Image: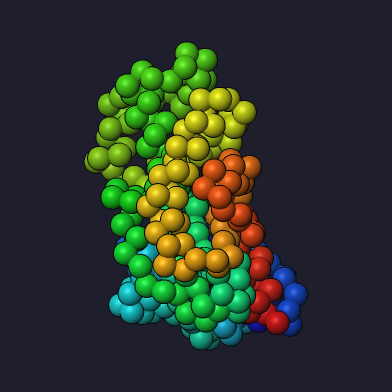
Amino acid sequence: MIAVVYSGSKTAVWRIAREGKAVAECSMPGINPCFVDQKTLLQQLNKKSILINHAEQIKRIYVFAAGATSADRKEELATSLGLFFKHSKITVENDLYGAAKAACYNEKGIVGILGSGANCAFFDGNHLEENNYGLGFILGDEGSANYLGKSILRNFLQEKLPLDLEKKFSKKYDLSRTEILERVYKKTLAQQFLSSFLEFFIEHRSHEYIQQLIDSAFEDYFDTYLLPTIKVYPGVQIHFVGIVAGNFQDRLRLVAQKHGLEITTITKEPIYNLLNYYSN
């Protein structure tokens, strides 16, 4: 029995398979080792009956997690998981490698993540080319869910939202200026708070103003991540992975067309492709 885990900073998705067939699945808060310590992770694991019931049977676990970007972070996460899954051999890679495997399998391509966070890299079918894009939700992540969250909050606080959207936003979230600033600057897990507003974008995706915010975020993503990568690796197929790319692929393809680019695939939930790859 194997398990495959794909985790952004907000959510970790688990899929368990026996002899190539999926037998169980669950989700839990993200397991980014930059933000989640060993004690918290073990507490979260012990709340999941599916994982408790299968812990002794799982022999291999393939983990792809945001924040697992160095050897130390990978070892830290593998060690923590090993305290719970005592009979498993655990392999940890970052979420971008998981996205690349899900989108390209063993073929080369340029892979972009647009989920709770954002990233991009060239994949040669086996290895990712190193980049300097991973700046996190404060300095980077253009185009991501938390980036969109910052844009809607900023426009709301500056009273720049159209009146109809402002009323709907206020009714849905009932947040004061003080509460918003406290959640962003003082409380923990600010990136999860920012990402949570993706639901508002999805609910009002047909609104022209929301489309403008999405398109602007995607333009920032292209300028920061994709176009510099294409400049170094021209003519390579382009793939996207993640909940933002999946939910707004029509807007993403339109922005790509403006730059004379064609997107080969968009995968909203890479976990299914990863499970197929590692269980066969």
* Occupied quadrant, residue 68: bottom left
Q: Quadrant of the C terminus?
A: bottom right
Point out the residue furthest to the left here.
Answer: 186
The colour mode here is: rainbow
> Which residue is at a point 33% across and 51% down the rendered structure image?
140
The x and y percentages for residue 217 are: 44, 41
Residue 36 shows up from this direction: no
The x and y percentages for residue 115 are: 50, 52
Task: Say left or right for 241 vs 276.
Answer: left
Point out the residue furthest to the top here.
Answer: 163
Total number of numbered discs in the rendering: 0
Query: Of residues 135 and 237, which is closer to you in this image?
Result: 237
Residue 227 shows up from this direction: yes
Q: Quadrant of the N terminus?
A: bottom right
* Occupied quadrant, residue 275: bottom right
Query: Of residues 223 and 142, which is closer to you in this image?
Result: 223
| 16 is higher (above) or lower (below) than 47 | below
Task: Say left or right for 103 vs 91.
Answer: right
* Occupied quadrant, residue 131: bottom left
| 243 is higher (above) or lower (below) than 61 | above
| 40 is higher (above) or lower (below) than 1 | above
The x and y percentages for residue 105 are: 62, 75
The x and y percentages for residue 257 are: 58, 46
Query: Of residues 220 and 244, which is closer to you in this image?
Result: 220
> Which residue is at a point 40% across and 45% down the rendered structure image?
220
Task: Say left or right for 181 vs 155.
Answer: left
> Which residue is at a point 52% across and 15% down the rendered structure image?
164
> Which residue is at a point 50% across and 52% down the rendered structure image?
114
